[in-house]
Image: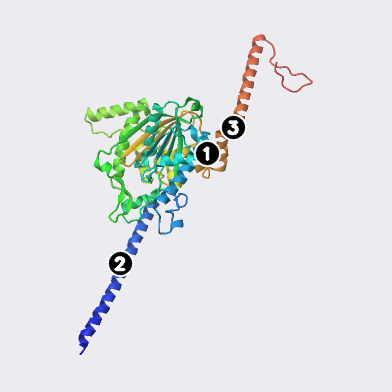
Amino acid sequence: MVDIDAAWNEKRKQEGSIFNKDEAAAKAEAEADAEAQDVIDFQYRVWQKSGLSDNATYLPKSIHPKFCGNNPRTDMDSAAAECRMAICGAVEGVLKKTGLRPENIDILITTCSIFCPTPSISSMVVNEFKLKKEIQSYHLGGMGCANGVVACNLAADLLKAHPGAVALFVTNETTTPAFYKGKDKHRLVTNVLFRMGAAAMILTNKRSLARKAKYRLENRVRVHVGSKDEAYKCIWYGPDDEGLNGIFLGKDVVKEASRGLTIAMLKIGRSLLNWDQIAAIAWNQFQMKVMKKNVEQYRPCFAECIDHFLIHAGGAKVLDGIGSNLKITEDHLWPSRTVLRYFGNVSSSTTWYTLACVESLRGVRKGDKVLQIGVGSGIKVGVNQWRALRDIEDVHDAWRIRAEAGDRTRLANVSHGGLHIGLRLLSLAILALLVALLYRLFIAHQAGAPAFSFPAAAHSLKFW
């Protein structure tokens, strides 16, 4: 005999269980959708304040939504493809521009913070361009955005140890492996700010290349405040609670970066500041430490002694803070903001993009002082002081589309064109004629004779 009541109750339990499961699944799905939307909204808010253009910056296909949709690829093959495309393009460009051949390169330095394959990136360049077997090859990894400035120390030391050598310096940050797929907001910021890019430079102390050189490195300062835990831990790459890797940006980044930059600027300021500024600093320190007065610390205006600033464009707020600390105008910050707008944060290459922006859109005059500032994980700070050896008005490929047509033509003529050489020769010829004319006038005056004669049958000027 069947217990009808028991069967009915069992059926109700099963139906209730099914209903509860469906309800729980729907609730979980709604929560997941809300969480995903929150991630999107957060990144959008960061982008709105970032200073990046909405359609001008570049991402590799592996993580570009147009090509990968909602499934970004962060595997080694995709990272290697991005790295090879960016670096090889930069190296090809600098070799073509300088007229150097791969066999002329004695020292190779490459940088990339996150992507660290085996063989190294420097080995990839050696293989791609068939560099000579005796080359001094180095790759620097894990040093963050400061690497493009800090690595100049290594290049300078190597050139000092190898007089007459030619160094190829290549900076890059491969964005593919650094792309974060999780929900931690401390790691999502880098998805918004970082973009792909690379830069290549030739550094040398070879006398035969001196006439081609654009700049001389006059001073370099390096500061590492990583002995303090807050500085060491405020930027790091690693997994979140779900095991997804990303670059973590802590709340102390700005504070520790400012501390490192202050130390670096105090060190390099001795060779930059004028005597009035040095005297003002000395008097301020005397008041604070000897007279024990409660006075505001003196901050020199570096715009009085520097012509061009190449500041790491880490983000709009970063530029605001550095500009305020250095007491420089918005006009001095314009090149860095322009890089951020059109190329994003290209990590260690950023300050070199800024130099290219200055050369392409403004020009550099002989004797101009250029200050290059890089800040990166660690916290590390690098400051390089360069001096222009000649007038430089050079439209780089990365900036060609941004320059106005008239400016581009004018700058290109000054930099490379045969028209520029012709104009220079014409100027010299006119100057020689003027000197000859003045000399003739002087001789005629001394002799009491007329300087010119105008025959009736001729209307052309005749020199005697």
Name the kind of residue labelled 1 in the image. Answer: Val
How far apart are the alpha carbons under marks 1 and 3?
15 Å
The picture quadrant where one finds residue 381 is top left
Check the picture and name the quadrant holding the C terminus. top right
Instruction: Residue 163: name its quadrant.
Output: top left
Residue on which the image places disc 2: 28
> Residue 353's x, y, as percent?
45, 40
The type of residue carrying mark 2 is Ala
| Residue receiving disc 3 | 420
Q: Nearer the viewer, residue 373 or 335?
A: 373
- Give the residue displayed 44% in from the left and 51% down from the top: 60
What's the amino acid at mark 3? His
Reading the image, the residue beneath label 1 is 395
Location of residue 234 in the rendering, given as x and y in whole percent from the top left corner: 29, 45
Of the 4 image quadrants, the one containing the N terminus is: bottom left
User: Which comes before the other along the chain, label 2 or label 1?
Assistant: 2
**Dot placed on the residue nearer the N-terminal end, 2 or 3:** 2
Q: Is residue 108 left or right of residue 436?
A: left
**Mark 2–mark 1 distance (CA, rounded to whole Å):** 55 Å
